[in-house]
Image (cartoon, grey):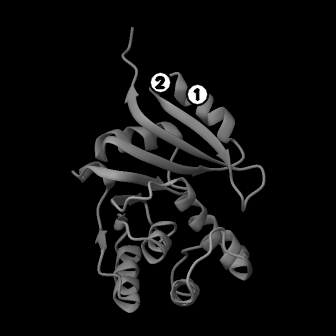
Amino acid sequence: MPVRPVPRETSERLEQFAQLVLAENKRQNLIAASTAAEFWTRHILDSLQLLDHAPEEPGLWLDIGSGAGLPGMVVAIASSHRVILVEPRRKRAEFLARCREALGLRDVVVEQRRVETLRVAADVVSARAVAALDQLLGWAEQIGSANAQLILPRGANAVSELEAARNAWHGDFELVPSVTAPGSGIVLAQHVRRRKAL
């Protein structure tokens, strides 16, 4: 069952995307093979839940280290946000570009580069299984607008990661539980800026 109701056309497009990922996974390691049988729950629904924490008003959504297109491609399929998928690895970026064409997603841009080289002002920033929280906050400070909403799924160490991050960062932080991965959390942050050294 979807985290949020989606129209039949959207559900069909998500299923098409799932099949593209599973087929490509035989050529390059996009997702752990052990999660393939639970693709809808482990990857589609896990990505869809992020929209519950995003602004309703469509804006520019930037997904760091998109890999298989999770969550960025799912966000693009299921919402009206314009989406930039940042992926430094050539084969993965090429796969994302093929998905964009196959799914007819005109509001998706694939950037094959490291996020540090990007200069944008995103309204929403997401990243899934990419880097440590402190590193993500540094990137987000660089690429987010002044009021950017950061939506960062974390694993079982979410609480300790957030506590450590608060030592180095100012901002409005909230940790919400993942509805698809018990014990994991999603860090929501806004107005993030690095604390000045004493």
Between 19 and 46, the one nearer to me in the picture:
46
Q: Is residue 84 above or below residue 178?
A: below
Task: Quickly name the residue at label 2.
Answer: 168
Q: Is residue 10 left or right of residue 94?
A: right
Image location (x, y in percent) of residue 164: 58, 28
Task: Quickly name the residue at label 1.
Answer: 164
Name the quadrant of the N terminus.
Answer: bottom right
Between 4 and 83, the one nearer to me in the picture:
4
Q: Element type at marker 2?
A: loop
Q: Residue furthest top?
A: 198
User: Which quarter of the picture shows residue 37?
Assistant: bottom right
Q: Element type at marker 1?
A: helix
Q: Dot 2 surroundings within 10 Å: few (below 14), some, or many (20 or more)?
A: some
Q: Residue at x 24, y 53 (%)?
A: 118
Q: Dot 1 surroundings within 10 Å: few (below 14), some, or many (20 or more)?
A: few
Q: Is residue 180 left or right of residue 147?
A: right
Image location (x, y in percent) of residue 71: 51, 66
Residue 33 in view, yes or no:
no
Image location (x, y in percent) of residue 83: 35, 67
Between 102 and 111, the one nearer to me in the picture:
102
Name the quadrant of the C terminus.
Answer: top left
Residues under numbered marks 2 and 1 in contact, where contact means CB atoms less than 8 Å apart: yes
Q: Is residue 42 left or right of residue 82?
A: right
Image location (x, y in percent) of residue 160: 67, 33
